[in-house]
Image (tube, rainbow, N blue to C red):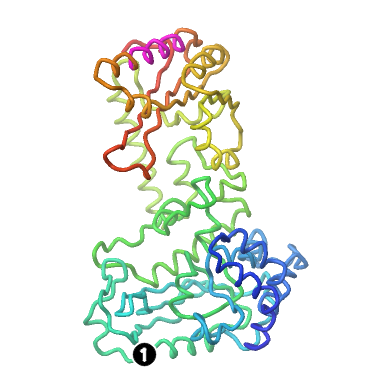
Amino acid sequence: MMEAASRGWEDGVTRTQRASTLGDIDALKLSNVLTTNIATSSFFKNLSKLDSNPDDDIHPDDKFNRLKLLLKPDEFVKLGYPLPMPGFKGGRYKDFVFTSDNYKEVTSRSPMFGMDCEMCLTSINKLELASISVVNEKLECIYHTLVLPYNKVVNYLTKFSGITKDMLQTVTKRLENVQKDLQKLLPPDAILVGHGLCNDFNATKIMHPYVIDSAEIYKVSGRHSKTSSLKTLSKMFLNLKIQIYGSGGHDPTEDASASLQLVQWKLKHDETYGNMLMGWVPPTDSYYDWEKMCPSKSDEKAVDSKQERKDSSKISTEKAIGPFRRTDKYIFQELEHCNLAVITTARCFKNYLPILPTLSNIPLMEVLSGNKQVSQRARDFVPNSRLTFIHMEMGIKLSQCPNKATRHRQLRKLDKRLHRIHKAAIPKSIHVYVFSGSSLNVPFEKHSNGFVLVGIKDLPFKT
């Protein structure tokens, strides 16, 4: 199987490997070249047939087919998972092994296993495996062991790994023992689940074709490249606190269980759940509605928590003063219904390019040559817009001022422009003025800070 799995990659990967030595091919381009060949190779031959698995044969605990959450071949490449590249037995993957000699076709009823590893920094300046845990779908730990790295440990990274020198003092288990244990433990159609599992695969030096990465199926930031931590997602979706040991480090069994629970929780909803890039919208009526979505620890705790929230609400309302009162509504709920306009310069517009594809409602964009043109155009926009972003750049202009008096003159000119915009706006409209600072690439002595001003026309109460 190892020969067959690796042989299927040879033709498609060799030319990509040659091209990548030029240093100009990013992960996306690399994945585009590889996808066709990977999907038809032996290692991933079953993944290419997933569409043929019917949704009506889903696992009894799931609301949709768990196969939809599996990483696709191109995602393996983009995320840096170890793959059987040509000549891998003599290259960087020479010590890597497959988790099975003969993989079976993965199905909607294939078992899932949560996996997590902890590593230490060794004398060869690499992170090496020091601890590993595997849990089954009942959240039972079916495998846990400490591992003694071959190279001398120079930093136990206890704050993160939870590993200390004393813990490894009498350990004799080595990496190849763990690899053999996993080959015996995992069925040939096992689905491995973890958070950023590519790091664990590289630590254990294994290759496995069926993977669900909890860091990839939850996207709450609205950005492709931004992944949320396991700790954050566990609290947000499971109402589960993990990694609370501070300097004591992480518990691999706890982390493996949390990542598996996140997948199980998503499978109780739908494929878009928890992924803003797929159109999912988080609950915004109140923080407590979000809490209700999380699995409760017990009925008794849920009742106590409900009563506590009720009391807390009363106290907050009683302490309200003047026109202000406590409300469970977020301002973002109101902004969601506003017609949005963004007016900016061509230079500033570049910052919006990565963001626009992630927005559910694309704002009206107006791009102009300079600050003067932006302020003039803004006066035309604000009478018809409830929410307007005016994005300008002042850093360069102010840095070019020869003296303090000239700088004050520029600021007074800006003040007059903002006053005219505010005067032209309709009542109860919001205007956000964004002023960009310098890039991080600029030398420190030339740094300039950015700032944001927010104005509301004719507030419905006195301040």
Residue 212 in the image: state x and y as whole percent.
Answer: 56, 66
How many labels sit on residues? 1
Q: For the C terminus, which image quadrant?
A: top left
In this picture, which residue range is highlighted in magenta? Answer: 411-422
Does residue 231 appear left or right of residue 348 in this picture?
left
- Residue at x 40%, y 31% (from the top left corner): 436
Farthest residue to the front: give it.
402
**Residue to which mark 1 is pinned:** 173
Query: At 44% across and 69% down in the image, what residue appears?
Result: 256
Image quarter in which the N terminus is found: bottom right
- Percent position of residue 115, x then y: 47, 73
Q: Is residue 421 magenta?
A: yes
271 with respect to 55 (left or right): left
In percent of the image, x 30 and y 15: which residue is there? 322
Dot 1, how many residues are within 10 Å of its Cα: few (below 14), some (14-19), or many (20+)? some
Residue 171 image-quadrant placement: bottom left
Magenta stretch contains residue 361: no
**Which of the 4 image quadrants contains residue 403?**
top left
Q: Hey, what amino acid is under mark 1?
A: Lys
